[in-house]
Image (cartoon, rainbow, N blue to C red):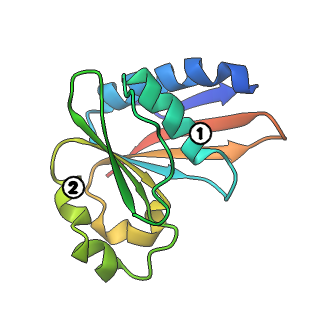
Amino acid sequence: MSPLSIPIPTQAALPAAAAQLRAAIAEAGCSVVAFEGEMGAGKTTLIRALAAELGVADDVSSPTFSLVNEYRDGHDEPVYHFDFYRIDSVEEAERMGAAEYFDSGYLCLVEWPARVAELLPAPHLKVQLDVLNAESRKIEVKIIN
């Protein structure tokens, strides 16, 4: 898969961007997707839109304190959503079984992946979310080997 750039000029463009991201994830064949971006860039909002595109009917929210939320997609397959912002160490992520989740083959959507970088499998997909202004964002998607 070639690197991909997805513009999000307004909030209204988010569903179309999520559809493009879903296609990129399918093309890449990576079950672990690492979402990078500054605080407030919209990582959880993008994951919520992606989950809707995947057929997740559950309320999607950041697992800031629980570290992981599990949803079911439209095929009743698990989708794991991680937020490692408040994690104290890689060892804490290991104790909660992060590596087993990543190795499960099920879709793992990871916020703040740099905090557990050594646990991320190769390859995985990196989604860089950049703020352009108050309403617009740009997504860069690439495979990390």
Residue placed farthest to the right in the image?
134
Which type of secondary structure does the marked residue at label 1 adopt? helix
Residue sitting at 39 percent across and 82 percent down?
Answer: 89
Residue sitting at 72 percent across and 27 percent down?
Answer: 11
- Amino acid type for the residue under numbered disc 1: Thr
- The residue at which mark 1 appears reads as 45
Foreground pick, 27 / 78: 78
Dot 2 alpha-carbon crowd within 10 angstroms: few under 14, some 14 to 19, many 20 or more: some
- The residue at which mark 2 appears reads as 101
Q: CA distance from mark 1 to mark 2?
A: 22 Å
Q: Give the percent coordinates (x, y) of residue 104.
A: 15, 49
Which type of secondary structure does the marked residue at label 2 adopt? helix
Total tally of numbered discs in the picture: 2
Residue sitting at 51 percent across and 35 percent down?
Answer: 48
Q: Quadrant of the N terminus?
A: top left
Left or right of residue 134: residue 10: left
Q: Earlier in the sequence, mark 1 or mark 2?
A: 1
Left or right of residue 72: residue 144: right
Q: Give the percent coordinates (x, y) of residue 29.
A: 26, 33
- Amino acid type for the residue under numbered disc 2: Tyr
Residue 2 sits above or below residue 117 on the image: above
Q: Give the percent coordinates (x, y) of residue 91.
A: 29, 82
Residue sitting at 60 percent across and 28 percent down?
Answer: 6
